[in-house]
Image (cartoon, rainbow, N blue to C red):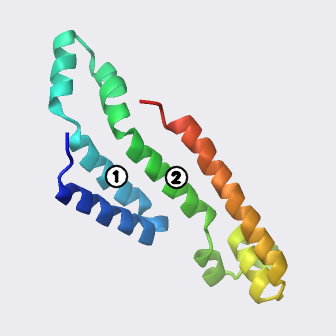
Amino acid sequence: MKVPRIVISFLLIILSFILSFYYWNIHVLSFFFNKLLLQTVPSQYYEAAKMEGASSWQQFYHITLPMINPTIFMVVILSTIGGFNLFIEPYIMTGGGPLNTTLSAVLYIYKQAFQYYNMGYSATLGFFYAIMIMTVVVLQKKFIEKEA
């Protein structure tokens, strides 16, 4: 089945919105993204499963979930990366807070670079932070994405 260009364009627009507004809007956009994907699952699969006597839970587990699994994977990965990149809220509200209670990892790296002028240290922290995020993403890929 060939995907029409309009669908690909729409998915790219949705992806750009997710990347632009990942932190607060990720749940709303992922809801609409999943809603769109649920509508794109071909009804022939459900009809065939119903004729074979599959229950609604079996239809969900064996038809719906595998069809929307790549989208679930993408939403989980973008949400995870968005959670790791918490910076603007603690920076604006408290600047790290009293006794560093609201200091996030990204804010700590920023402070090391631009407040204390430890550029080498902050570059090293940023590099290892990126490796840590990549490790978490690879682990999520291993546990979420199934082989087709």
User: Can residue 104 be seen in the rendering of this structure?
Assistant: no
Which residue type does callout 1 highlight? Phe
> Eyeballing the image, is 120 above or below 39?
below
Give the number of the mark in front: 2 or 1.
2
Q: Amino acid at mark 2?
A: Ile
Q: Are marks 2 and 1 in contact (CB under 8 Å)?
A: no
Q: Does residue 143 appear anywhere in the picture? A: yes
Task: Name the one closer to the observer, 73 or 5.
Answer: 5
Q: Which mark is residue 139?
A: none
Residue occupied by mark 1: 31
Q: Which quadrant of the rendered structure holds the N terminus?
A: top left
Q: Residue at x 26, y 41 (%)?
A: 38
Q: Position of residue 10 (x, y in %)?
A: 24, 61
Query: To which quarter of the image does residue 132 belong?
Result: bottom right
In the picture, measured across the screen, residue 143 lies left or right of residue 3, that is right
At x 68% / y 81%, what residue is drawn? Answer: 94
Q: Residue furthest top?
A: 53
Give residue 68's quadrant in the image.
top left
Q: Is residue 50 left or right of residue 91?
A: left
